[in-house]
Each structure stands twice: as C-alpha cells, then as structure tokens.
Image (cartoon, rainbow, N blue to C red):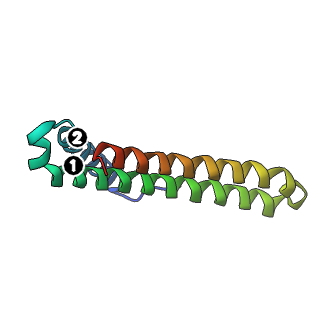
Amino acid sequence: MTIKKGGFFMLKKLLYVVALMTLFASAAMAAEGDVAAAGGGLAALGAGVGIGIAVFGGALGQGKAAAAALEGMSRNPAASGKLLVPMIIALALTESLVLLAFVIAFVKIQL
C-alpha cells in the first residue's frame, strides 16, 4: 500500500476529527436526569457517529480479509479449502463486533 504525497497529513487530520467526535460523544453520553432529556439529540448524534465509525472500520476489515483470502486462493487454488473456513469465521467475528457497537449505542441512548 502506498501513501500519496500529503496522504499522511490527511490521515492525521482524520484521526484528530475522530478523536474530537469521540470526546463530544462521551460527554453527551455522560449526562443524567433532566440534562439527558435536554441533550437527548446529542446522545443520538454521538450514538450515530459511534455506529458510523464501527461500520466503517468493520467494512474496511472485512474487505481486507476477503481480499487477502481471495488473493491467497488465486495464487494457490489447492489451499482454498484451508482458507475459506477461517476467512468466514473472521468475517463473522468482525460483523459481531459491529453489531455489538450497534447494541451498545442503542443501550446508551436508552431506546
């Protein structure tokens, strides 16, 4: 994988934005009582951002896992049986983490 000129700085900027969103999401989730009722929109926004980040990361992980397994199968077709089952297990575990983030976000905003 090659990084274009300035790509590292773009990645760094993206990480800063994600860190700021995470900071604000945790502040929105920490509210209690009447404050939570007043800032319910912020909690929902934080949950939505959290789910979006989880889905984005899960999709990237699943795509890389599938690409690597398919590349291995194309280079060595005899090993396809040995690569298919671990790939499916890895994809299922990745998807379960995304679903766990989904459940945690909805529990936090009490839906």
Q: Mark 1 points at which residue?
A: 43
Q: In this view, does 86 lie to the left or right of 94?
A: right
Check residue 33 in the rendering and tell me which mark sits there, or answer none.
Answer: none
Q: In this view, does 18 lie to the left or right of 101?
A: left
Q: Where is residue 92 in the image (x, y as percent from the top left)?
A: 63, 51
Identify the residue shown where x is 31% and y is 52%. 111
Identify the residue shown where x is 18% and y is 43%. 28
Q: Mark 2 points at which residue?
A: 29
Among the two numbered marks 1 and 2 on one chain, the one whose residue lies closer to the N terminus: 2
Q: Residues within 10 Å of mark 2 (few under 14, many from 20)?
A: some
| Amino acid identity at mark 1 | Ala
In depth, the one of 37 and 12 nearer the eye is 37
SS state under label 2:
helix
What is the CA distance from the residue labelled 1 to the residue labelled 2? 6 Å
Q: In this view, does 61 lie to the left or right of 85?
A: left
- CB within 8 Å, label 1 to label 2: yes
Identify the residue shown where x is 16% and y is 36%. 32
Locate residue 31: give its quadrant: top left
User: Total number of numbered labels?
Assistant: 2
Q: Is residue 76 left or right of residue 43?
A: right
Q: Is residue 77 above or below residue 29?
A: below
In depth, the one of 24 and 47 nearer the eye is 47
Q: How crowded is mark 1: few (under 14 residues within 10 Å), some or many (20 or more)?
A: many
Identify the residue shown where x is 20% and y is 35%. 30
Q: Position of residue 95 (x, y in %)?
A: 56, 52
SS state under label 1:
helix
| Amino acid identity at mark 2 | Met
**Residue farthest to the bottom?**
74
**Residue farthest to the right?**
78
Q: Position of residue 18 (x, y in %)?
A: 28, 48
